Image (spheres, coloured by chain):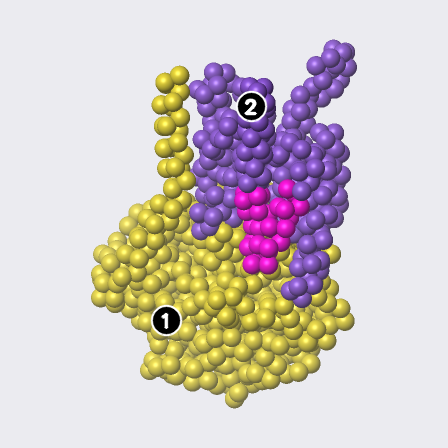
Amino acid sequence: MSSHTSAPILPLQPNAPDKKRLFTLDNRYIAPIFITCILLVGNLTFGILESYQKTLLAIITSIALELVLSRIFYGKFAHPASAYITGISVGILVRSPAFWPYALCSAISIMSKYVVRIKGRHIWNPSNFGISVLLFLAPAVVASLSIQWGNYLLPMLIIWFLGSAIIWRLRRFHITGIYVVSFIAFAFLRSWMTGSPWQSEVAPITGPMYQLFIFFMITDPKTTVRSRKWQCIVVVIIALVEMLMRLDQVVYAPFYALFIVGPIAMLIEIWLDARRKNAAQLAVAH
Amino acid sequence: MKSRQIARVFLTILFVVLLATPFLIKRITASKAADKAKTDEKTALARHGFYLQEVSHAAGIDFVHEEPKLDPKLDSIMPEVASMGASVSIVDFDRDGWPDIYVTNSAIGSKNHLYRNMHDGTFKDVAEEMGVADVNKAGTGVSTGAVWGDYDNDGYEDLFLIKWGRPELFHNDHGHGFTPVSEQAGLPPWINANTAVWFDYDGDGLLDLFVGGYYDENIDLWHIKTTRIMPDSFEYAKNGGRKYLFHNLGNGKFEEVSEKVGINSRRWALAAAAADLRGTGHQDLFVANDYGVSELYLNDGNKFHEAGEQTGVGFAPKSGMNAAFGDILNQGKYSIYVSNISEDGILIQGNNLWVPKQGTSGDGIKYENLARDFGVELGGWSFGAQFGDLNNDGTLDLFLTNGYISADRNRSYWYDFSKVAGGNSTIIGDAKNWPAFDGRSLSGYQNKKVWLNDGTGKFIDVAQAVGVTDTHDGRAVALVDLWNRGVLDVVVANQDGPLLIYKNTVTPEDRWIEFDLEGTRSNRSAIGAQVTMFWNGQEQMQNVSGGSGFAAQNDRRLHFGLGKNPQIEKAVIRWPSGKIQTLDKPAANQIYKLKEPE
């Protein structure tokens, strides 16, 4: 059975000495702890959440569904870390006065991993799938996080620093780094094309929505291609598609860009894998 | 293996159903709304008990608000920075027993209008002859609102003109004209405010004045030195205008005491209202702030302490644009309505209806936001709102106006707005970083809300059904029985748009009662007086207000709907002085003119 992660989660070194393990944080917990810190600090200092109850609903729905579905389809309970990240992402990113979108978004996110599978792999980052679908289908009651952290510099820098350190440890920093560089380059290009002040084009990436996007969505190992080189290429394409959408004034361009580009990249990789496997089998047969 | 396949099929079906859920909910909601809108006057009367007809032209009012044009350095985002100024306040300035209407204009050189009630269904603009028209002269700023209160207790309501500019206090010369007295009163030379409230915070029988700044008072918006005038955060901005509390010294002079009494904030105030929320006999002050949390200043008679977080109303930051009190459950407790921004798919702040939590009262009072449960949460880019019993059924309804900038119908500024609003303070705070509006709309052409209270904690929007079909950029709402008929009419001031008079027709079976109060020991305007009606085993409390909603003031006369065949027990008046007066079994369908007993 493959685990169903939605964030960078790498296994511990199998030969790590026990004593060291006692003092080394299991990588599976790093992302959940980080995102929990974002949530708690954000809410205690700036009141970022719609309500604790709504976030809790998203988390509980996500974890409960993950446990039930993994038990049904794979015969054992999946580790809840991934579902926890999905739930908490939904709890932070979805903004709605109603309760049901939180439960629905979490449910769609988790179920997408079990329903939409190609050759045993799910191709969408779960929370990206759930949030994109909901923003597209239920705009009257759902928006996404667009403003938080008081628009101040210090909280933003702290999260960027911690997020970068963690993502570095998880060996995914190249994805985040290249995306950020691409975004900024495309922002200047947009500014040149549209005549908008460059500050307004760069502004979105300074917001918290992007912090969750670049640290938790685009780096998801289960829904990114395996090759480091192609990871870099794909993330540039995501930024490019996002830029094109932004030229068309699509507010949630990053979510939709990942929603479109991510699965296509995955499908190409799956197709290439299958072709390589077939070729190898043919070679063996000959 | 087979069971897993069945499970997978089942899961796939469930997944598709879940994906379709938002679509189905939308369809059902739209179908219900369409059904509600399909009515005419007769049906509206039969179904909802009232009908509103826009009669401004027939009433002799053809006022169209002109918006301000500020420093050219702000040209690219002028529609946004100059998006306020339309206001309406109700006053019987000549004490003839018929309410008059004062409306502000906001272009340099434009005139404010004072519409005298001619008692025959029409109004006549007398602002010029009364001396309160030409108040938007170059170098003095422009009007953004007006509140009336008899600060010298001579029996005639005086006018405080709220401005982005030099604030003006006008003394009412016994209904024959107005004299500007700002200098003698000791008012500051410049405030960029959108809200002010008359109330007697210390109970000395003299009306004091709260003024809430929006832009920093050191900025002359027509001659800005820097483009860094915007809020430094969309949700936590603290670089707005300061607050003022002018203590009435009783000799025509006021002393600014805000800091001394504990009001010290630079949030971007847009609306304020005062009422005794805790039963202490002192009026507490609620301030709704743009770009941040609301503030609730609890008043102990000579000191305030800010209790927004403590009471629950000041934690989640939104874009507060309205403050109105209403005893919506007929329990003798005020709820507070604050309007915010909701735009499909982009920003769903939702309006707040702060209802006192069960079991809390007095100093321990806490509020919870029940706007969603009560059905008054989503009102677009909401501005002014007021509570009033529009169909005289005995429960307070809610009229909300909305719409921010209506320009090109096919092009929206929302994308650019959301882009910048989510950015860092160094970006958002500087107007030059904001993309040009370029003729685009921002939450324009919105349908208004007339939420009818069914008495069980549910409000239903009947705006389209009862004749409120305009889509102007609404700002201020004032409720008043314009023609002494026992019904609440609605006056709406629109930014860069016409003043609307919605004349109300109510089924005559529903009864009413009104109270026109005059203080003696208390301030003569009786602002802060509280009337509680007891009938049919229920009670409803209302408060004479010195300004509420957004840039508005309802008539000081209090109007109660009583429903059909009311069994009236009593009316209890608590005057600001603390004096309690009880009227046993007052008759329905009467206007009671009451003077505070000596």
Report how far apart the C-alphas of labels 2 and 1 lie in the structure: 82 Å
**Chain letter for the yellow part:** B
* Chain A colour as displayed: purple
Please tell me the numbered disc located at residue B502: 1
Image x and y of residue B101, in percent: 45, 76
Magenta-drawn stretch contains B240: no
For the point 47% across and 63% down, the residue is B402
Magenta-drawn stretch contains A248: yes
Provide the residue designation for mark 2: A282
Image x and y of residue A168, in percent: 74, 33
Q: In this rendering, would B255 be left or right of B86?
A: right
For the point 61% across and 35% down, the residue is A224
Give the quarter of the image for residue B246.
bottom right
Q: Residues within 10 Å of mark 2 (few under 14, many from 20)?
A: few
In this orientation, which residue lies closer to the viewer: B597 or B88? B88
For the point 59% across and 22% down, the residue is A283
Marked residue chain, label 1: B
Looking at the rendering, the stretch of residues picked out in magenta corresponds to A234-261
Q: Nearer the viewer, mark 2 or mark 1?
A: 2
Please tell me the numbered disc located at residue B494: none
Task: Determine the residue located farthest toward the top in the rendered image.
Answer: A18
In this orientation, which residue lies closer to the viewer: B96 or B193? B193
The amino acid type, in three-letter code, at marker 1 is Tyr
Q: Is residue A87 above or below residue B166?
A: above
Q: Is residue B153 above or below residue A118?
A: below
Q: In this rendering, would A136 be left or right of A9?
A: left
In this orientation, which residue lies closer to the viewer: B169 or A138? A138
Q: Are marks 2 and 1 on the same chain?
A: no
